Image: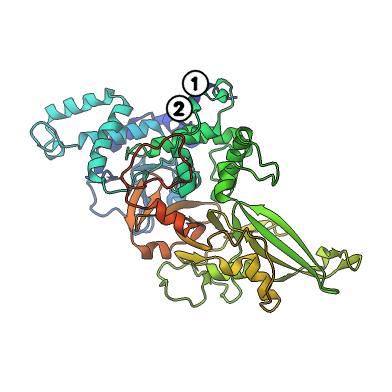
Amino acid sequence: MMSRNSMYTNPKPCKHLADYKLRHGLSGYNLLQEQIRTTPSGKSSVKNHQTEIPRCCFCNGYQKRLYLCLICSSISCSSHTLLHSQCENGHDIAVDIERSELYCVLCCDQVYDPDFDKIVMLKHLMDLPRSGNGVDVSAGRRSSKRRRLCSALELDLKKTKQLVSMRDLRAKSCYPLGLRGLNNLGSTCFMNSVLQALLHAPPFRNYFLTGQRNHEVCRKRSSDRLCLLCDIYVFFSAVFSGDRTPYSPAQLLYSWWQHSANLASYEQQDAHEFFISMLDGIHENGVKARSPIKDTGECHCVAHRVFSGQLRSDVTCMSCGYTSTTYDPFMDISLNLDTGNCPSTDLANKSLKPSDNTYVSTLLGCLDLFTKPEKLGSDQKFFCENCQERQDSVKQMSIKRLPLVLCLHIKRFEHFPVRRMSRKIDRYMQFPFCLDMNPYLSSSVVRNRFGNRMFAFEGDELDTSTEFEIFAVVTHSGTLDSGHYVTYLHLKDQWYKCDDAWITAVEEEVVRASQCYMLFYAQKMLYYKANEDLVCQPVSPRADPFLPIAGCC
């Protein structure tokens, strides 16, 4: 078990980074600091004095993402970093030139190292304007100034980040509260992308910002096992504190590892699998604090109150017409791409205009496919209670009850057990920002099946709003084995791209052209209440966690 003293430390680096530091120490970091350039908006990049436009040493390209080797300083594009490592033994660690972040070539992902983070943050501090006479430090770097600035190496990293945070608050004061980058701790972009969506799911966010759980006296703090709910409270408090410097969710990562031991590694994981695992962990902790309703047995944990809905499954005998109906809860809906009218070639071309719907999938088409009657195979014959034998049957899915926040998962990864192979579907899919789920409710689906005849339905689906607004899109780029997750957030009529530690404002067209993997929709009235222009005020612990809380500063 992990000791309590390690709860607030950063994760250990990947083994390739550890090997690099064992052989070379921090010499590569210190030399690289001379080439780091910062901007007034808080970004940092690597600039080489020897070349104006960096190019890949293999293909001479410059449009792809470029990486600088920490050992030989050669530059490779994303397609040739592995080739460089194979040609030069031990050259496994590089730096993303555009974002000045560590990258492990063998892990094919960003890696986090607090020593490197300290070097970059110190560079930000060195480039800050002087407060005394207003002279920019970076304008003239005399040796005397350099000696004074280098003494800042002894500053505590926390104090350094606070100074940079003050600059970021001035530069980005117009950004909504809670819009904060998350450091990649080593192949953790899958976690960061989902956390960004959860941070801004209106009722989910409001629950953790009310401070209803007294995590200071939580009994689980006295044991070796970490409390996931307490760590989520700490995480939300840190992100919504107003600090704009990228946050490292190491404590939350540790806590999740203990609740999902089978996924505890620095290898890249699936974002959807992390989402389900996270909700399961919240449910596991929540049911111990709240008892289910005696009459219905419904769970009142925040995960189920926000994301839980109910599916209806109708299996009809093709011989006598007898129908068996079952109901199952869901936390999200996984959809197959409607590829029936699409060619087999790759259609995930970013140059494809969103208005061009030729040979592309659509979210509405995927939902139609989900609720379309499906004839079950001969190996899935249904035992008909009327015929008293197994018969051919037709199965049809529909939605009995909608959740407050609807998560739609697009199945982009296919697995073939017989061939022992997997592949990713890189097909472009159109999705609406405003979604009406009424055609996919059980009342609509069943009535349509029987010629729009009137049927009596229970009141669950009639009391729920069917109009939803999108607020988060989790995308995946790259291949099945080597990819990257990015989240787009819609806050106060503006889209923001959350790429680990980097937050940038983007246009609507960029989001529409992205390769969506998970879509998060909130009920329309809930969404607009959460985006009202209200002054941020402390929330009473006794307040209703589902009341809207202001989302802007």
Residue 159: which numbered mark, if any?
Answer: none
The quadrant in which the N terminus is found is top right
Residue 5's tag is 1
Q: Quadrant of residue 117?
A: top left
Query: Which residue occupies the foreground of this view, 423 or 160?
Result: 160
Of 36 and 54, nearer the camera is 36
Identified at 88% across, 64% down, the residue is 385
Structural crowding at the residue carrying mark 2, measured as other residues with C-alpha within 10 Å and reported as few (<14), some (14–19) or many (≥20): few
Q: Secondary structure at mark 2?
A: loop
Residue at (58% x, 70% y) in the render: 439
Quadrant location of the C terminus in the rendered image: top left
The picture places residue 377, in percent across and down from the top left corner, at 79, 68
Q: The residue under label 1 is which amino acid type? A: Asn
Label disc, if present, on residue 9 of the rendered structure = 2
Which amino acid, mark 2?
Thr
Using the image as rendered, state which of residue 529 and residue 58 is in the foreground.
529
Q: Are marks 1 and 2 in contact (CB under 8 Å)?
A: yes
Does the rendering let one see residue 35? no
Classify 333 as above or below 82: below
- Image x and y of residue 401, in percent: 62, 58
Check disc 1 and report its element: helix, strand or loop: helix
